[in-house]
Amino acid sequence: MPHHTPLIGTIVAGLVMAFFMGALAHRLRMPPIVGYLLAGVIVGPSTPGFVADSKLAAELAEIGVILLMFGVGLHFSLKDLLSVRRIALPGAIVQIAVATAMGAGLGLAMGWTVMASVIFGLALSVASTVVLLRALQSRDLVQTEKGRIAVGWLIVEDLAMVLALVLLPAVVALQNGTGGQGIEGLLRSGGLVLVKVTGFVAVMLVIGRRVIPWALHWVAHTGSRELFRLAVLAIALGVAFGAAVVFDVSFALGAFFAGMILGETQLSRRAAEETLPLRDAFAVLFFVSVGMLFDPAVVVEQPLPLLATVAIILVGKSIAAFALVRVFGYGNRTALTVSASLAQIGEFSFILAGLGVALGALPQTAQDLILAGAIISILLNPILFSLLVKRNRADDGQRARADSTGSGAGAPKRTVLVGYGRVGRLIAASLQERGEDLIVIEDQRDIAEACHQAGLELVVGDATARDVLEQAGIEAATTLLIAIPEGVEAGAIAARARAMNPALCIIARAHSDEEVADLKRRGADAVVMAEKETADRMTEICIRQGA
Ligand code: AMP
């Protein structure tokens, strides 16, 4: 047996260590990301023992980026993207400028060249796709207005970085007077990037929009689940890779567009489900690969510059983003969410720093500071978010109390329905006909759209999330109907809703005796088992026919 298998070794070491450290973090009530990053440090070169291949790990992480962006694209329409352009475009550009200026200031204070200082500042100005999307997804914010602004902002940053990566070698050459193409050459390179990006978008919107949905529909009609899954992966990875090779745009942007085009079809929900497990596994490898790059020595050797770097990423960038979003007339909450989601750096910063060092334009210290700054900001990001959620909750509490003092006693009947699928829509139609006060929670965009068309009040989101239940007004509701087929998820919803509203009447749907027992244990007052009801009805009809 050959034992030199670096790819297998890296995947296995990364996932196994991430699992152990993630589980430990969970036990200690810390965000799992902390565990994954630590797992990376453990399998990385800075610590003794097994050393995984950091280059391979970084490449594997790219697959995570592709699948994440593809998934976000599935829930995005061109309309959504255009609807945030007025804030995302100037917002991202001004924030990049402000963060670059702060970073460059620090670089100059450290005695680096102007070029090194500017590269350093640029590296601090871009947020990580993976960190941002995971933060938004785990809180179900992607499809909210704040989420759309943050994603739009991210895409502008992504494009700016593509431009920066292409122009950097040319600018350095120009400055060194070696093989410089002159200013016109530089402008030409920049123009070429824009032409290529436009070309890619045009090809996707004109050709991709016709071919991709057609191909997927065809595969769906073959009835083969395996082929469908394969087709979705082939589209996500193929378009991302093709975009990078042919049009020089990033993998992330390519994948986002592939997802956005599929998002317009009815198949988007199935497509999202098929890529979920892989997406999560590779996103974990992203954090492991970041951890691997971390050299703990820098904390001891450069404490003050590191502190300043982290301050720029966490405080400087946040204040700039917050102020910008407010200037555009959005509320405090939106501004806080957008600034918290951008207060970190990641993959683009590493690539930029790596290129800077390779070109001899950036000192090694700067790269070390960027890597350490990234890991620290990624570690602190979940904490920033939970502070934010707490703050919002405190606000909500105040508002709810203010509302309840205004209203009289004797709460009217109000029903919350989770799921607008085969079961939920029948319930909704009956209750609607009776003129009952009803609000639906549904997490699939296309299905939610149907619910909206039916004229029902609606919250789009995953009902296992506390803020989604809160948004549906669970605290003031009298009845909760959980009409989803997944027993474990239904149990989580029941338990959470019960904790939020002890007086609530909870009625749930189940498909096995175990689920019935579990749901009751977790707070459901009544559980209807679909199979049992079907069997009873069928028996009844059979007996009646015999009589
Ligand atoms: P069906 O099995 O056809 O009744 O469909 C169940 C519906 O519930 C689907 O439309 C799902 O999108 C929706 N659903 C499943 N889980 C959740 C959840 N956690 N939050 C909100 N909607 C959900």
Image (cartoon, helix red, strand yellow):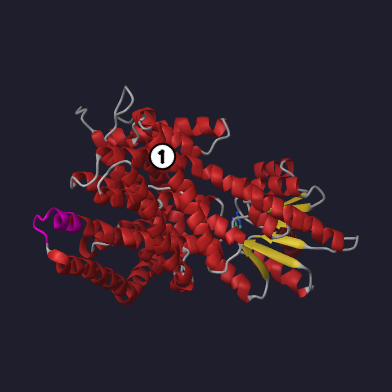
Residue 542 appears left or right of 421: right
**Nearest the camera: 331 or 246?**
331
Q: Is residue 306 above or below residue 123?
A: above
* Residue type, label 1: Ile
Residue 1 magenta-highlighted: no
| Residue under label 1 | 375
Q: Is residue 67 above or below residue 281?
A: below
Which residue is found at the position 58% from the left and 66% from the top? 330
Q: Is residue 12 visible?
A: yes
Which residue is found at the position 74% from the left and 66% from the top? 438
The image shows residue 382 at horizontal and vertical percentages of: 53, 44
Which quarter of the rendered image does ligand 1 occupy?
Answer: bottom right
The part of the chain drawn in magenta is: 170-180
Residue 337 appears left or right of 43: right
Please tell me in which quadrant of the rendered image residue 516 appears. top right
The C terminus is located in which quarter? bottom right
Which residue is found at the position 18% from the left and 54% from the top? 172
- What secondary structure prevails in the magenta region? helix
The N terminus is located in which quarter? top left
